[in-house]
Structures are given as structure tokens and as C-alpha cells.
Amino acid sequence: MEYQERNRTRGYQANNIYGRESQGGYQKRRGTIQGKISLREEWNQFLDYVNGSWRVKALILLCGVLLIGVVTKFITDRIFYQEMEITEAFVETDSGCIESKLQITADYGTAFLTEHDKQALIGYLANSLGIQMEGETSYQENDVSQVYTYEKAAKQASTTIKAITLRQDASRTYLYTELMIKNDKNFDILSYRDILIEALKDLQVVQAETTIQFLGAYEGDLPLERWDKIADSMIKELGGKVVYENRDKELYTVYAYSKMLPEYISVDQKKVNIQVAMRYEEDNNRTVVYLATPLLRGDW
């Protein structure tokens, strides 16, 4: 009897405990269900409000169109307009890279620099390119500028480095580097560009303008239709749009703009970062083609 009584007591306690837990679970589930019902009612009220107001419908539709436009532009820019090297277009010409040229002009600011400082800057840039300086830098001065220049020529390459101080621009100093490589089949000029840009960053240069150009050639005097095909193929490869063109053999040049290339200049309020130029060299009996970004510098 005592044993049975204890079992009944334990059973009652157990039922009481489980009963409280079951009741708590029931209340929790009930609260969740009521919360869902409340959210559904609020959503239904919102839909009724939207359906009853054409202005709200128009606003939501406009927001949806704008959102789609933003997302589409983001995807397009990321997929179709990623930066690319200009070499990818030049390779398509099968003209061979007879010569590549890199020119970088960097604004070093208006800090006072001694002659030793300027020569040290030239030496630093030369060393970054792996050039062992031999001989002295030349010096020129006039009412406009002071220019320190170091030049070195080799069989396959030539380098010019300058420190230019403009008197009329609060004594602002510019660092100019020009590197030319002959028969640059592997487009090593791009590696030197990256090296120079990193060297300028170490010098805390904020602003620098970079020009890269390639020269190729075809044997003989190609017809004008072939010139057009070569120029159009390179611009198309770079995703460019023609801004200005003069397709005459006396002066053949095409300017274009592409989002795939990082730098550009403004010409008559229009962006330009591709230039294609061609000419026929009668002495060498060849048609030469230039491709540059953003523009060709010097004679061509």
C-alpha cells in the first residue's frame, strides 16, 4: 500500500511537471500562430492600401524599374567592362610588336628640392627599373624650367628619366620616365609599367599620367579597306566607341573611348583613351600601325 501510494504521488508529480511543460509549449505555439496571423493581417491591409491607390502603385513600379536598372548596370560593368590590357587588342593584328613605348609623368608636388634631391629621385627610378647609372645627369635651365635628365641606350632598349621643375607653377616638380623596347614580343613593357607605378607610390606620388603605345608593321602598301579593318578590329576588341576619325592615307588616325581601359583624357568634353594611327613608309615598303592609350605622344 505504501509502495502504491508513493507511485501514485510520483505519477502525480510527473504529470504535473509534464503538464506545465505542455502548457508552456502550447502557449508558445499559440503566441507564434497569433504572431503569424497578425503579420498576415498587416500584409493584407498593406495590399488593400496599395490596390486602392494608383499613386502608390506607380511609386512601387518606379522603384522596381530603378532597382532593376541599378542591378543591371552593376552586372554589366562587372562582367562586360572589366579592365583589360591594350596588348590583347594589338595581338589580334598579327603585325608583330616592332617597338613598345611607356611614358609616365608624375606630379611630385611643390616641395623645395635641391640638386642632390632631384638626382636622387632620378637614381631611385633608374634603380627600380634595374638600370645601373653610368655617367652624369645633364642639366638645362631657362626662364621657364629646370631640367635634370639621365639617358641610357642599349641595343634593345632606351631609357630617359627627367626631374622637371616649372618656375611658373609654384616651383612644381614633375618626374618623367620614358622607356622604349624594340621587338617586345612578350610585351615586357607592361611589367616595367607596374614596377614604375609601385616605385612612384613609394615616393608618395598622388597623380601620374601613363601612356603606352605599340608599333607594328605589315609588308607592302595595304589598301585603305585593310587599314579600316585593322583599326576597327582593335577598337572592337577593346569595346571602344569611335569619338573622332580621319580615315585618309595622308593622315590616318582614329580616336575612341573604352570603359575597359582605366585612364582617359577629355578632348572637347569627350572622353578619349584609344588612338589608332597608320601610315605607309615608302622607303621600307611597309605599312606601320600604332595603337596607344590614351594618346600617341611625339611624332608618328
Image: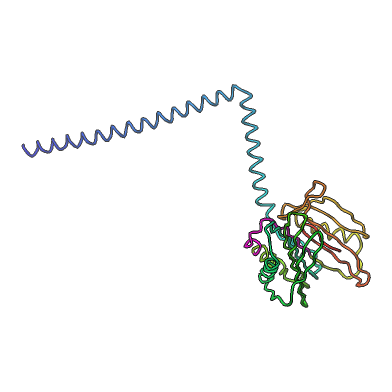
Q: Is residue 167 left or right of residue 201?
A: right
Question: In the image as oriented, which residue stretches furthest toward the top?
Answer: 52
Residue 177's image quarter?
Answer: bottom right
Q: Is 47 above or below relative to 71? A: above
Residue positioned 65% across, 51% down in the render: 78
Residue 97 located within the stretch drawn in magenta: no
Q: Is residue 38 visible?
A: yes
Residue 205 located within the stretch drawn in magenta: yes
Q: Is residue 75 left or right of residue 269?
A: left
Residue positioned 49% across, 26% down in the render: 42
Locate the N terminus by quadrant.
top left
Residue positioned 51% across, 28% down in the render: 43
Q: Looking at this view, is 61 or 81 the one in front?
A: 81
Residue 234's image quarter?
Answer: bottom right
Q: Is 139 above or below relative to 207? A: below
Residue 35 horizontal/vertical position (percent): 41, 30
Residue 295 horizontal/vertical position (percent): 80, 58
Locate the C terminus by quadrant.
bottom right
Query: Magenta part of the protein: which range?
Result: 199-213
Residue 210 horizontal/vertical position (percent): 73, 60
Q: Is residue 15 left or right of residue 216?
A: left
